[in-house]
Amino acid sequence: MEIVYCGHSAFFIKGSKKVFIDPFLSGNPSATISAQDIKECDVVIATHDHPDHLGDAFDICKNTDATFVSQHELVVQAQEMGLKAEGMNIGGTISVNGVKIHMTHALHTTETGHPTGVIVTMDGHAIYHSGDTGLFSDMKLIGEMYKPEVVLLPIGDRYTMGITEAVKAVELVEPTYVIPMHYGTFPIIETDPEEFKNRVGKLAKVIVLKPGEKFEI
Ligand code: ZN
């Protein structure tokens, strides 16, 4: 399975199915691909409705016939546009096109509904994308119950966790791998991923990806 980092919090996961999470491409200065470049996709997930997360989700679904997955309120919007969409909410698990998705809480804001994180399980790998969030102690429960192998965590501070909180999140979730996200896209969320890596130390393997780079598991 390949986890391709597309900048900011956008990840294109390519296994037996193709899953795009938070596809902020148009207007993303760090994006290395555009929505039009995506020819095949099975599931598109938006953790919340902020434009730097919902991004090009609806366009990708339109172009590829992928199913849009998000919380109920955003799914209603997608369905009104005639897109294939599966609604869910925090605490629930669904299977869409062979991909298992569990929705978690996230500590953040939204215009519509509530911010979320997701655990995507496919081909025997569980990947936790926390969405935009502050640190919360139930991350320990997420680690215990869903045992994600890979965790995608924001480190850019100001709107989400910074490095100090993200290190604590790694301690709570106990994944094998961590990929930092939501930093460096704009000067206001600039930070040093190498400092994060040093401070995580032996807790987990930190994989620092530049936009366009991928991690294989
Ligand atoms: Zn946000």
Image (cartoon, rainbow, N blue to C red):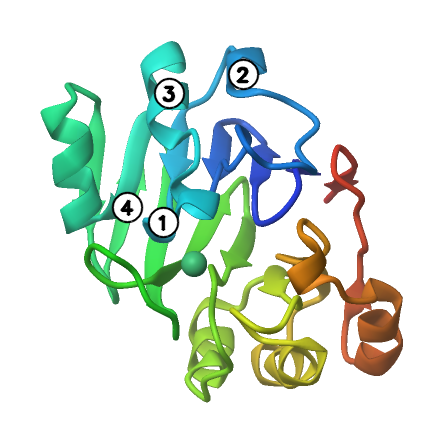
Please state the horizontal and vertical placement of residue 186, each as a whole percent of the image: 67, 52
Q: Is residue 96 above or below residue 203?
A: above
Between marks 2 and 1 in the image, the one whose residue lies nearer the viewer: 2
- x 52%, y 69%: residue: 159
Q: Amino acid at mark 2?
A: Ile
The Cα–Cα distance between marks 4 and 3, rounded to whole angstroms, is 15 Å
Q: Which mark is residue 38?
A: 2
Between marks 1 and 4 in the image, the one whose residue lies nearer the viewer: 4
> Which sits earlier in the primary sequence, circle 4 or circle 3?
3
Q: Amino acid at mark 4?
A: Ser
- x 62%, y 73%: residue: 157
Please state the horizontal and vertical placement of residue 11, each as a whole percent of the image: 58, 41
Q: Amino acid at mark 1?
A: Ile
Can I make out residue 120 in this image? yes
Q: Which mark is residue 59?
A: 3
Q: Tag 1's secondary structure?
A: strand
